[in-house]
C-alpha cells in the first residue's frame, strides 16, 4: 500500500511518478535534509548496485542527501545476500536493531589521514 505526503513531495520536488523505482520505505528528516531509502529484503532483495544506480539517477536533481539502507530480518539472512548488497549503502538487522553495518569504507578511511 502506497502512502504519500503529497504536500511534502511537491515541496521537495521529489519525482514520484516512477512508483516501481521507489524503495519500500522513504523517510525524510526535515531537520537534516536527508532522505532515507529503505529496502525490505524480504520483498525485493537488498539495495543492489543496480538499484542504487536507479535511485541515485531518479533523485539526482533533488538536492537532498540520500542514505540507502537494506533491512534484513537477521545476520544469517544478510550473509545470503552479502554479494548482492551495494557498497555505499547501510545494512540494518531486525534481530540487532541498535546497530548498523556501513558498507562505505572511504567515509571512514579518509578520517585516518
Image (spheres, rainbow, N blue to C red):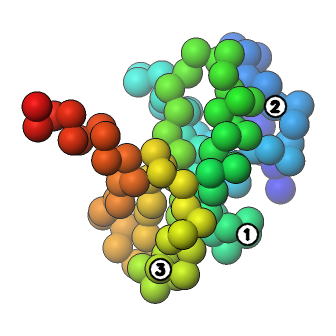
| Count of numbered labels shown in the rendering | 3
Residue 73 is at least partly visible in this image: no
Q: Answer left or right for 18 relative to 12.
A: right
Residue at image mark 3: 79
- The crowding category of the residue bearing disc 3, from other C-alpha atoms within 10 Å (few below 14, some 14 to 19, many at least 20), is few
Residue at 88 percent across and 31 percent down: it is 17
Q: Nearer the viewer, mark 3 or mark 1?
A: 3
Query: 21 or 103: nearer the eye?
Result: 103
Q: CA distance from mark 2 to mark 1?
A: 20 Å
Image quarter in which the C terminus is found: top left
**Which numbered disc covers residue 19?**
none
Circles 3 and 1, Cβ within 8 Å, touching? The answer is no
Q: Would you identify the image quadrant in which residue 18 lies?
A: top right
Please state the horizontal and vertical placement of residue 83, each as a whole percent of the image: 54, 69
Residue at image mark 2: 16
Please state the horizontal and vertical placement of residue 104, each as a whole percent of the image: 37, 47
Q: Which of the two discs, 2 and 1, labels the residue nearer the N terminus?
A: 2
**Which numbered disc covers residue 43?**
1
Please state the horizontal and vertical placement of residue 3, each as a whole percent of the image: 78, 44
Please state the horizontal and vertical placement of residue 97, each as a whole percent of the image: 37, 67
Q: Answer left or right for 95 relative to 106.
A: right
Residue at 21 percent across and 41 percent down: it is 109
Amino acid at each position: 500500500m502506497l502512502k504519500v505526503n503529497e504536500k511534502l513531495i511537491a515541496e521537495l520536488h521529489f519525482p514520484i511518478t516512477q512508483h516501481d523505482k521507489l524503495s519500500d520505505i522513504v523517510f525524510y528528516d526535515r531537520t537534516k535534509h536527508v532522505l532515507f531509502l529503505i529496502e525490505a529484503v524480504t520483498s525485493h532483495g537488498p539495495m543492489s548496485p543496480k538499484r542504487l544506480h536507479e535511485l541515485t539517477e531518479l533523485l539526482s536533481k533533488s538536492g537532498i542527501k540520500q542514505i540507502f539502507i537494506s533491512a534484513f530480518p537477521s545476520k544469517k539472512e544478510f550473509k545470503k545476500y552479502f554479494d548482492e548488497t551495494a557498497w555505499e549503502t547501510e545494512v540494518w538487522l531486525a534481530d540487532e536493531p541498535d546497530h548498523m553495518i556501513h558498507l562505505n569504507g572511504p567515509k571512514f578511511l579518509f578520517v585516518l589521514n
